[in-house]
Image (cartoon, grey):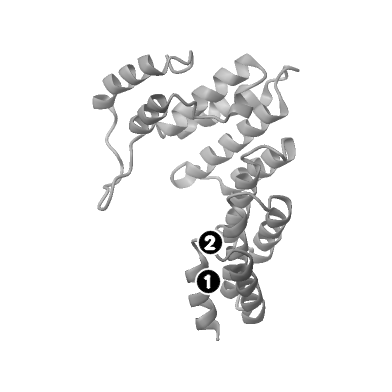
Amino acid sequence: AYLSERPTEAVEWFERAKPFEPERSFVVVHGHIPTGIERLIEAAKSGKSLIPEEARQGDERARLILMLADVYHEGQQWEKSLELATAAIIDKSRTVTPEQRSYAYFRRGRNYYCLDGAAFDGHAAFNDYAAAVRAAPKAPWASHAMFLAANIQWNHHKDGQAAIRLWTQLCQRYPESDEADRSAFFIGVCYQWMGDAARAKAALTAFTVKYPHSRFVNDARQRLFELE
């Protein structure tokens, strides 16, 4: 029903599936974290597809594969979602658009990152995020892919300089994106983490001037105070 874009019917079936969800591997101690089925129900109720419109246009088979990959991802079935995203990537059909292939890379990267334990593959996630940007640099998710790629360089490879280069490129290429101010802030944080106080001060000061209404401004000012 969801793949056929019958949202009202999809909600009904997702509601029936809800009691049979597997138990979580964690306990929510504060607030509410929606389950996979709850996220699917919310998407169906809104009448919106999980995947962006740009990835739905083009090859029909690729559209269905990507929609199903997102269903599995929302249901936290990372391996199955990864398998489907790979199927869209290797599809040689000429009607598969660059945006569809880009989104498949982006979705596969998210799944590689979400895999648990030894299955986690940050290197593969990084490569897929980079491939997503190359395939469709103007896609709405391209800036987010670049941001996540930079995060992997910092958090998992401990390569602050590589992360800063990517965040800087993001600010230059996608200045209007939702990730631009966060990237500018993280540049300062990363310099501080690397022990380069002078560059950290310069980056954080530039950030507060350029993004005075960012949600990270107070944190940036506190860091500047500490650096002084």
Can you say whether 58 is above or below 30 in the image? above
Q: What's the residue at 58%, 28% (across, down)? A: 85
Residue 220, numbered label: 1
Mark 1, secondary structure of its residue = helix
Can you say whether 62 is above or below 39 in the image? above
Q: What's the residue at 26%, 25% (across, down)? A: 20
Q: What is the tally of numbered marks visible in this picture?
A: 2
Estimate the x, y position of residue 66 in percent, counting from the top left. Answer: 56, 25
Asked if the residues shown at circle 2 and circle 1 are in contact, with their CB atoms under 8 angstroms apart, the answer is: yes
Q: Is residue 133 left or right of residue 151?
A: right
Q: Amino acid at mark 2?
A: Ser
Tell me the residue that label 2 is attached to.
214
- Badge 1, how many Cα within 10 Å: few under 14, some, many 20+? many
Q: Amino acid at mark 1?
A: Ala
The answer to which of 71 and 11 lies nearer the viewer is 11
Estimate the x, y position of residue 7 in percent, counting from the top left. Answer: 41, 18
Outermost residue toward the bottom in this view: 228
Q: Tell me the mark number nearer the camera, choosing from 2 and 1.
A: 2
Q: Is residue 92 left or right of residue 8?
A: right
Estimate the x, y position of residue 103 in percent, counting from the top left. Answer: 62, 33
Can you say whether 105 is above or below 60 in the image? below
* Residue 6 location, quadrant: top left
Identify the image quadrant of the C terminus: bottom right
Mark 2, secondary structure of its residue = loop
Q: How far separated are the C-alphas under marks 2 and 1?
A: 10 Å
Estimate the x, y position of residue 205 in percent, counting from the top left. Answer: 62, 74
